[in-house]
Amino acid sequence: MYFLIVDSLRKTDVFSTETPGYVGFANLPNQVHRKSVKKGFEFTLMVVGESGLGKSTLINSLFLTDLYPERIIPGAAEKIERTVQIEASTVEIEERGVKLRLTVVDTPGYGDAINSQDCFSTIISYIDDQFERYLHDESGLNRRHIVDNRVHCCFYFISPLGHGLKPLDVQFMKAIHNKVNVVPVIAKADTLTLRERERLKRRILDEIDEHGIKIYHLPDAESDEDEDFKEQTRILKASIPFAVVGSNQQIEAKGKKVRGRLYPWGVVEVENPEHNDFLKLRTMLITHMQDLQEVTQDLHYENFRSERLKRGGRLSSHGYVLPLSPAYVPLCLPAFLP
Amino acid sequence: MTCLAGGRPQGGVLRGPDLLGYVGIEAVLDQMRRKTMKAGFEFNIMVVGQSGLGKSTLVNTLFKSKVSRKSCSPNYEEKISKTVQLQSVSHVIEEKGVRMKLTVIDTPGFGDQINNDRCWEPVLKHVNEQYEKYLKEELRVNRQRKIPDTRVHCCIYFLPASGHWLRPIDVEFMKRLGKIVSIVPVIAKADTLTLEERTEFKQRIRQDLVANGIQVYPQKENDEDAEERLLNNTIRESIPFAVVGTDREHQVNGHRVLGRKTKWGIVEVENVAHCEFANLRDLLIRSHLEDLKQVTHDVHYETYRVQRLTAGAVHQGGPNGSDLESHL
């Protein structure tokens, strides 16, 4: 009976030696690991960009699935009057026992109207709504199963056809950079030669600096990480904004099947790092998923929360009413007399 | 402008179809591990029991370092205090790159007086005060990124090895505290019991616990799945652990072991045939440390929070200590 407990632990111990002086709390990271695997992860990714920049194709390529099986692309006449919609699809991906619940928020209609003056207020309301909902859940009485639908990352698609950022791009990114992690992405990068791509990237980075836009910065690798990880982080940081090509079609190239786009002059391979930055984008997203969530929680959400609480009053959007007193400031707790 | 009602994500949940390749989600776990290693861990453990039951020795043995000062050490000058005073000592210990800030909360004076009526109250008050501190910080407008966690994650309650039943003071204490903190009862100085006496004593204690409605760790309702339930059932059938603590080493069969040397033999502390110290250590540290913290955060703290927030709306004058107790 005693040995059942001890044996089941020995299997999971990373360090199995009974060295004298060994207490065993070095096993803590494994305990945390086990609990996270059981719990799974939630991640919400928003994609914003004009129609036809390949957003949906890219999302499907990133997660090797088809999120939009029955898609009907509306014709131009319909698009004129269209306003920005918010469409969220959720998919659960499981790999080697790790579950990821991924929500992709698409924003069709962005930039489509002739007058795009107001097209991002819908998007900003959506982001704020998720924060509001989370704040409400977090302040409620039953916090057992809070679902985190806050937007953790926003891929902003930049057209490769211009010479940098368009005024709409600048305005939009400035409007959301304090609410969500912005990752700029150059779409349909197969229209650019390597030199043009480098020039465009530099141009975009300059303009981002010039306008004071705060994009998501990858955290530097720690000094105690292994060299490979440090090198990977260096390469990723140097390639922002990522220039990507998306495709889910399998093409025969050089004797093997690759995902790519077939042109008369050659095949653009999606997963070839020399052709485009797709793999880098995916690596960045996956390895930094946790950090993206943390920055959303610790920075963007906390900012939203402080602003919201300072404004005070009942949290009453969409009819949510808190079970607590209306003056939601720290003094609301009656004095605790021990 | 249109936005879907309530901004709720729509679209069905598509079950992970056949993935067309390998996405690499595991890398997220690596990131998590890196971060948790860097951040370090905190663990707050409280030891409750009469003086002389070997509390400090046991804590020192558990963590293989002198984190607690033993009352039997030569220069210890304090007399039995008139009231129960709580003393908190923190240490940072490190093992294989994992850093832990361990806080041991001692309760000298507990159960030592002639009249021990309500001697559990300072302990209750301390536990609730930590929850209150955490709650206050959580409610602030500008709150810290990582709220300092001083909540008691585990309370080891020392039962003297009488061999009979739970004493009234044990019942009263565990009844009240079992509702707000995870209690792990142990039989102290168990080298006075033979194996048969030990088994019978433990059975009687388990019966007593059930009869009095006392909740000890691991609580049945917190088992998340069948695998955990199986493991926890095994643990529940062997509590309370009969332990012996020491910091002295002796030579046994060519090895140096921790043990107590007597004329009739050496009690080896880490030998599961002699006492259950290794099981206690494995439970507390190697397998369930994270779970203890989680239960404290997800269950005990939430219970406190709900009580506090709903009571606050009613008692404008503010609940005082005895009001809270009436909720227990």
Image (spheres, coloured by chain):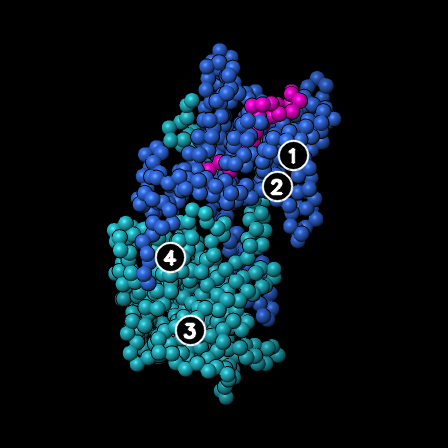
Chain colours: A blue, B cyan
What chain letter is assigned to the residue under label 4?
Answer: B
Secondary structure under tag 4 reads helix
Amino acid under disc 3: Ala
- Disc with the residue nearer the chain's start (1 vs 2): 2
Which of pointers 4 and 1 indicates the residue nearer the eye? 4
Pointer 3 residue: B242
Q: Position of residue A176 (x, y in %)?
A: 52, 32
Report the Cα–Cα distance between label 1 and label 3: 60 Å
Secondary structure under tag 3 reads strand
- Seen in the picture, residue B3 relative to A324 is either above or below; the reply is above
What chain letter is assigned to the residue under label 3?
Answer: B
Pointer 1 residue: A240
Report the Cα–Cα distance between label 4 and label 1: 45 Å
Q: Quadrant of residue B107?
A: bottom left
What chain letter is assigned to the residue under label 1?
Answer: A
Pointer 4 residue: B132
Residue located 57% across and 67% down the image: A22
- Disc with the residue nearer the chain's start (4 vs 3): 4
What chain letter is assigned to the residue under label 2?
Answer: A
Residue located 47% across and 43% down the image: A302
Amino acid under disc 4: Glu
Task: Evaluate if marks 4 and 3 touch, with contact meaning CB atoms under 8 Å apart.
Answer: no
Q: Quadrant of residue B248?
A: bottom right
Report the Cα–Cα distance between label 1 and label 2: 10 Å
